Image: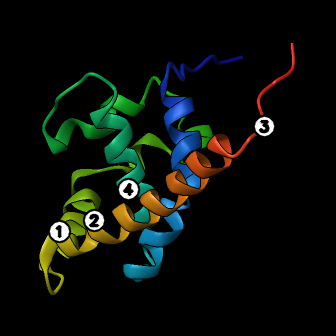
């Protein structure tokens, strides 16, 4: 039996999944037949790495995930070795080469996030007070 760690990244991964950010990214970046990990999964991995309290160069990126339950965080069949600097670099290049660059790419995320959070906020505000 092998035990892998999730830490707080399981919660972050759940929020990313709930917001559909992987799917939104995958709609914008076409998959390559030789890749094991979609662009959305790579971006999700970048977010998890950034929130994992570790800053490392791209060539060490996969080492961060070696002690994590990668298939639970990013999807079945995904392994830490799939998150290599070549794959990350290609996704970053694509994000920077879009018409309006990274700003345009993340503005779609921002509007999606805002709509979802506004819906949650409005449903909480309109809830009747709890009786005691």
Instruction: Calculate the distance from the C-alpha at mark 3 to the C-alpha at mark 4.
Output: 41 Å
In front: mark 3 or mark 1? 3
**Residue 80 found in image quarter:** top left
Label 4 sits on residue: 42
Crowd band around label 2 with a 10 angstrom C-alpha radius: few (<14), some (14–19), many (20+): few
Instruction: Calculate the distance from the C-alpha at mark 4 to the C-alpha at mark 1.
Output: 15 Å
In front: mark 4 or mark 1? 1
Q: Where residue 76 appears, x then y in whole percent? A: 65, 50
Residue depicted at x 12% and y 38%: 57
Q: How many marks?
A: 4
Instruction: Calculate the distance from the C-alpha at mark 3 to the C-alpha at mark 2.
Output: 35 Å
Label 3 close to label 4 by CB (< 8 Å)? no
Secondary structure found at label 3: loop
Label 3 close to label 1 by CB (< 8 Å)? no
Is residue 37 something one can see in this rendering?
no
The quarter in which the N terminus is drawn is: top right
Secondary structure found at label 4: helix
Crowd band around label 3 with a 10 angstrom C-alpha radius: few (<14), some (14–19), many (20+): few
Identify which residue, 107 or 23, lies in the foreground: 107
Instruction: Calculate the distance from the C-alpha at mark 2 to the C-alpha at mark 1.
Output: 6 Å
Label 1 sits on residue: 102
Label 3 sits on residue: 128
Q: Where residue 91 appears, x then y in whole percent? A: 26, 67
In front: mark 2 or mark 4? 2
Identify which residue, 80 or 11, lies in the foreground: 11
Label 2 close to label 1 by CB (< 8 Å)? yes
In front: mark 3 or mark 4? 3
Q: Where residue 50 appears, x then y in whole percent? A: 27, 35
Crowd band around label 1 with a 10 angstrom C-alpha radius: few (<14), some (14–19), many (20+): some
Label 2 close to label 4 by CB (< 8 Å)? no
């Amino acid at each position: 039996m092998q035990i892998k760690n999730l830490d707080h990244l399981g919660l972050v991964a759940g929020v990313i999944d709930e917001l559909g950010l992987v799917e939104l990214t995958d709609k914008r970046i076409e998959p390559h037949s030789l890749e094991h990990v979609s662009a959305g999964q790579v971006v999700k991995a970048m977010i998890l790495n950034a929130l994992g309290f570790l800053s490392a160069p791209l060539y060490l990126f996969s080492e961060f995930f070696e002690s994590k339950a990668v298939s639970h965080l990013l999807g079945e069949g995904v392994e830490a070795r799939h998150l290599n600097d070549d794959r990350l670099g290609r996704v970053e290049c694509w994000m920077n080469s879009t018409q309006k660059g990274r700003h345009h790419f993340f503005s779609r995320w921002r509007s999606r996030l805002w709509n979802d959070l506004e819906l949650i906020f409005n449903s909480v505000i309109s809830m009747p007070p709890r009786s005691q």
